[in-house]
Image (cartoon, helix red, strand yellow):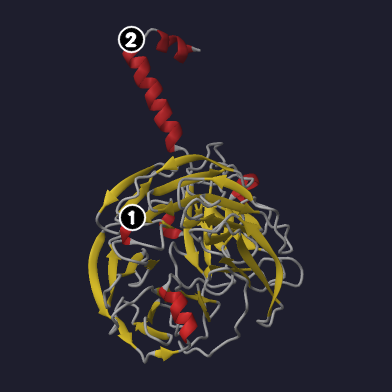
Amino acid sequence: MLYMKHCSTLPSRYLLLVILLSASLAEAQSPTVVGTALSPARNAIAAPRTAPVLVPFSQAINPATAGNIKIFSSQYGGQRTAMANTNGNTVTLVPTAPAGQSAAFKPGELLTVTVSAAVVGTSGAATAPYVYQFAAAATGGTGRFVTGAHVPVIGYDYSSDVRVGDLDGDGDLDFVTSSGLYRSFQLIPGKINVRINDGTGNFTAAPDITVPQGPTSVALGDVDADGDLDVVSANYGGFGGAGNTVSICLNNGTGLFSSPSNIVVGPYPKRLVLGDIDGDSDLDLVIYGGTLFQVLFNNGSGNFGGAVTLAPGNTGTTEIGPALADMDGDGDLDIIGPDRLYRNNGQGAFTAVTGGMTTYYRNDVLGDVDGDGDLDLVTTARARNSLFITLNDGNGSSSASKVIPTAASYTPCVALGDLDGDGDLDLMAPVFTNNLALNVWLNDGLGNFSATPTRLGNTQAMDRCGRRWRPRLVGGQLWWS
């Protein structure tokens, strides 16, 4: 009472100063994630598959809220279940799995850890949101491949995108692929093919998903937070077609999907990507295509809205579309788009920055190629016989660049993966010839690459790669998508 009475006699400008100082102190008491002490480390490329996730904070966390830290898997279980324990200022998450299944992360998969304001310190203050990613280790490979089985899919033109994940919750990897690209004069519904693995690499057809015309891109993610992988597709439509939509197809946990909920977007969506953009522990959506560049926010149940439109930059420079990653190390997901980097303020508002870590060329892929803990950029170019590597300075700007000749007149796409199991990211790129030719460069761990003999394959796969397909390394196996 004495303090309040004393304050009441102060001039108004001093009262305002007291209020501002009190607000600043309250904000300073909010817990923050100590990003330099995360385990696995931010952007780790070979995290132990059975290791727990340790999230250190600037102060102690209320144990009752520690379980609000979420782990999103790109291949198994969607939003992972985990036991959360607190010890001092650190929360430890130990992933769990149904009886009879392994809780280990899938080899090579991308994991996203999100800390939202629902995580509260013992002081009662909400945590500043934080999002980070790492990849699980894929060990035991030598960088040499053998021909696998060919799985038939149904399509009208060709299958333009494929995603691998455990769709039916049995612990092995299934896949979906989009089929039925746009045609100028025919209104043909698109198909999302669903293929279920028996655990030995043999796939059988599950009921396909019918979506509007022209599905050009698909993504897997647990958009409704029920512990399984849902399907999201971008439907291009074509001229006068029934596309220009994004389809949300919810999984019932067994690999059977609901009829799509279709969101009308701008003209000609080509590519989409999922990620927690605003730090609220659900997966939001970025859509790209020509002049279309939008962010849609998830309400946590798989309903998307609140569209934010971004300036698309030079849309003629890329066909793969945007990527989501923390390029500047501030604990949120930025957007790497055509001709510019979009820096996130942590709440889903973006500032476009031209130059630096941006996509200038045809296709791109992100990864820590020089082992310094940040994400570098590898790109290809139409009608150029080189790969271009841009090294990140840790703040989302370029520190150096390198050029790798490909000895080919045309390199349509590129991929990164630890092919020889030595803990760094190697390079793969197909060569546009009459036969499938795959070039591999092995990394010395510092971002210096040495070429290995070219691998040859079949004509049809090369044709598809030239029309937007690209190689992906999944669980030590090579997939074309």
* Pointer 2 or 1: first along the chain: 2
Q: Amino acid at mark 1?
A: Thr
Can you give x and y, in whole percent of width and height, for residue 81 in the image?
66, 58
Q: Quadrant of residue 310?
A: top left
Residue at the image position 54 percent from the left and 41 percent from the top: 117
Residue at the image position 50 percent from the left and 72 percent from the top: 481
250 is higher (above) or lower (below) than 463 = above
Quick check: marks 2 and 1 in contact, CB under 8 Å? no
From mark 2 to mark 1, how far is it between C-alphas?
Answer: 57 Å
437 is higher (above) or lower (below) than 352 = below
Can you give x and y, in whole percent of width and height, for residue 442 in the image?
36, 84
Give the structural element (helix, strand or loop) at label 2: loop
Q: Quadrant of residue 41?
A: bottom left
Tell which tag, 2 or 1, sits nearer the viewer: 1
Identify the residue under disc 2.
11
Can you give x and y, in whole percent of width and height, for residue 38 in the image?
47, 60
Residue at the image position 44 percent from the left and 61 percent from the top: 42
- Name of the residue lying farthest toward the front: 185
Q: Which mark is residue 315?
A: 1
Q: Amino acid at mark 2?
A: Pro
User: Is residue 278 something that shows in the picture?
Assistant: no
